[in-house]
Image (tube, rainbow, N blue to C red):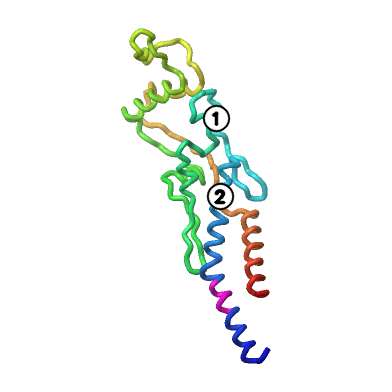
Amino acid sequence: MTVQEFAQEINRKSREFSDLIQRKMPIIVGRMAKDHYQDNFRKGGFVNGGLKKWPKAKRQDSGSSAAGANYGTLLSGRNHLFSSTNYTPGAARVRVHNDAKHASAHNFGETIETPVTPKMRRFAWAKYYEAGGGKKNAGNGKRKGKNAGSKEVNKAAEFWKNFALTKKKKLTIKMPVRMFIGESKELNKEILSKQEAEVRKIIES
């Protein structure tokens, strides 16, 4: 190899390294991070030096036969929080984010105060019936009165009935920390390994 050819090779690899840092790695890292964080939802906890399980949602221990009670913590039929995890690559950087309305409250924990509205009470009654707390009259197909029945079918129905009948004007909801995006030793190790592999490819090409 002549001096000129050597200089050309150095320039070529320099351009490849620059492209790796500025364009390729942000996309690669963003994809890896998104996959890692979404996998936290499947595992029901945050992986950082091992799996840190999330506190269970109350609906999971409610005894309800409703479909919602069977979903994992932070999961639902729509999986809105899960699917809102995404990444935005830039020049030599990437931003991993979740733009769902209550993402921060779930990730870091939060105490929320909310007024009890008539709409919320109607919703609570609907959830009460859905949880098995209301029965239909055999004759006319209508549900029994809101106070009918002396025994609640399960904890979920009891919860929603109490919510619908509460005399409180405002509710205080304490959301525990269920981190799904954050610093992760396992993710950092995977990223470093991938970065080294990409650098070796350029050197050996």
Helix, strand or loop under label 1: helix
Task: Give 12 or 142, whichever is nearer the viewer.
Answer: 12
Q: Amino acid at mark 2?
A: Tyr
Please provide percent x and percent y for residue 180. 55, 47
The residue depicted at 31 percent of the width and 27 percent of the height is 118
Looking at the image, the residue that sits furthest to the left is 118
Any mark on residue 60, and which? 1
The residue depicted at 52 percent of the width and 62 percent of the height is 27
Q: Is residue 128 above or below residue 138?
A: below
What is the quadrant of the N terminus in the image? bottom right
Helix, strand or loop under label 2: helix
Quarter of image, res 122: top left
Q: Is residue 136 left or right of residue 56?
A: left
Q: Amino acid at mark 1?
A: Gln
User: Which secondary structure type mostly characterizes the magenta part of the structure?
Assistant: helix
What is the quadrant of the C terminus in the image? bottom right
Residue 15 sits inside the magenta stretch: yes
Residue 52 sits inside the magenta stretch: no
Please provide percent x and percent y for residue 172. 43, 34
The residue depicted at 51 percent of the width and 65 percent of the height is 93
Task: Give 108 or 24, whichever is nearer the viewer.
Answer: 24
Q: Earlier in the sequence, mark 1 or mark 2?
A: 2
- Asked if the residues shown at circle 1 and circle 2 are in contact, with their CB atoms under 8 angstroms apart, the answer is no
The magenta region covers 14-19
Mark 2 neighbour class, 10 Å CA radius: few under 14, some 14 to 19, many 20 or more: many
Residue beneath label 2, please? 37
